[in-house]
Image (cartoon, helix red, strand yellow):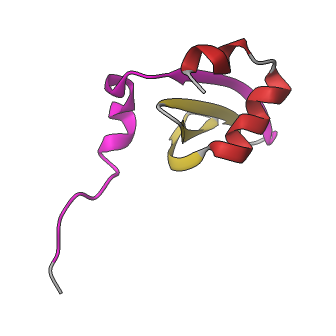
Amino acid sequence: MTLYQYNDLDEAEQHEAIWDNGVHIGERIEGEYRIILYQIFSFYVELRYHMEHNVLKGARSFSSTEQLKPYTDKIDINFKLY
């Protein structure tokens, strides 16, 4: 599935695609929202949940790795030998 095919799906089909194929990459807090990042095939989807009301308030899909910057500071890339 491509980003364009995903964007053509209705909301229920998009959620099913995330559930079936998405890999949880990370999450962050922004004000009242918990934003959860998933990778699906070769693109990404952010789901924005209102924390107090525990309800999905929006989604955003993208393929640019530039838009991953809010998450990269939380990824530990240090290699450790044991």
Q: Is residue 71 magenta?
A: yes
For the point 18% across and 63% down, which residue is it? Answer: 78
Residue 55 at x, y = what percent? 81, 36
Camera-side residue: 38 or 36? 38
User: Toward which corner of the image does residue 3 lie, by quadrant?
Assistant: top right
Residue 49 at x, y = what percent? 70, 36
Compared with residue 39, is residue 13 higher up or lower down, i.e. above or below? above
Camera-side residue: 3 or 29? 3
User: Toward which corner of the image does residue 70 lie, by quadrant?
Assistant: top left
User: Toward which corner of the image does residue 73 lie, by quadrant?
Assistant: top left
**Residue at the far bottom in the pictured view:** 82
**Residue at the far right in the pictured view:** 12
Compared with residue 65, is residue 28 higher up or lower down, i.e. above or below? below
For the point 56% across and 22% down, which residue is it? Answer: 2
For the point 66% across and 24% down, which residue is it? Answer: 59
Residue 33 at x, y = what percent? 63, 35
Residue stretch rendered in magenta on the structure = 53-80
For the point 60% across and 27% down, which residue is it? Answer: 1
